[in-house]
Image: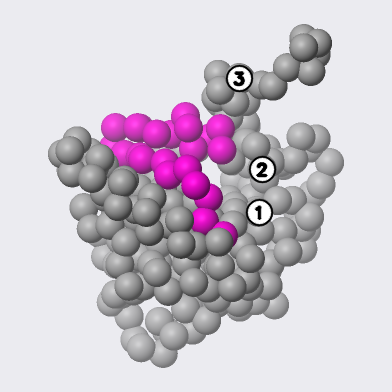
Amino acid sequence: MNKNMEEPSPQDGLETGRLLFTQHCDFLISVASFDQLPNSQLPEVAFAGRSNVGKSSLLNALTGHNNLARTSNTPGRTQQINFFGLGERILLVDLPGYGYARAQKSVVENWTKLIKDYIKGRVQLRRVCLLIDSRHGLKTTDHETMDLMDAAAVGYQIVFTKCDKVKALEMENLLVKTHNEIAKHVAAHPNIIVTSSFKSQGMETLRAELASLAKTKETNQIT
């Protein structure tokens, strides 16, 4: 095979991911309704999951910015869709947590609708990282979200969080069980990423995955 036509190695992907995430990452905007979404052609990767699954901690660890996304021990703290721009090549989107939240029922209903509208109607959305707490595995609300993305033909990838809080054998069994479950879902990415924000585990792999979805040229601007 011609050297110029060789497939990139896994190490190349890790380096591409590392370089992307050395770019400046900025908070751009918070939106509370679909018509407030930013006018941009940049690819978007959204982070979804149950309340208190660790989305903000993962975003901070992923980007290397301790205060990029606000963290809280109170489920349901994120009540809007938050957009972050990474090197003018990709937008990282922090979705409100679904499931249990300490908020008024009407507020929860509003942001649940916002999540659904965004997933079904956002053309720029390239993938959803569906965060799952390693201690609990897939729950009913996770399956409901997966069904929504299957129906909308939006690709999503399971990302386990807090893997440092479970034993290795438990994690191995959970992975086998989850692989069997996602095989039934047409829009699910076959590869599962295991992470720990506390120990920075899995961040290189996740960065490489997201880099494969980013713009290669910094030409588009958010307005």
Q: Nearer the viewer, residue 221 or 47?
A: 47
Q: Are marks 2 and 1 in contact (CB under 8 Å)?
A: yes
Spatial CA span between label 1 and label 3? 23 Å
Q: Is residue 199 visible?
A: yes
- What residue type is disc 1 on? Arg
Label 2 neighbourhood size at 10 Å, few (<14), some (14-19), many (20+)? some
Which residue is situated farthest in the right direction here? 219
Q: Position of residue 123 (x, y in %)?
A: 73, 64
Q: Position of residue 85 (x, y in %)?
A: 64, 47
Residue segment shown in magenta: 187-209
- Mark 3, residue position: 9
Q: Position of residue 94 (x, y in %)?
A: 50, 58
Residue appearing at x 79%, y 49% in the figure: 221
- Quadrant assignment, res 81: bottom right
Q: Would you place residue 193 above or below residue 83 in this image?
A: above
Q: Position of residue 41 (x, y in %)?
A: 79, 55
- What residue type is disc 2 on? Leu
- Quadrant assignment, res 168: top left
Q: Are marks 1 and 3 in contact (CB under 8 Å)?
A: no
**Quarter of the figure that contains the N terminus:** top right
- Quadrant assignment, res 8: top right
Q: Nearer the viewer, residue 190 or 76?
A: 190
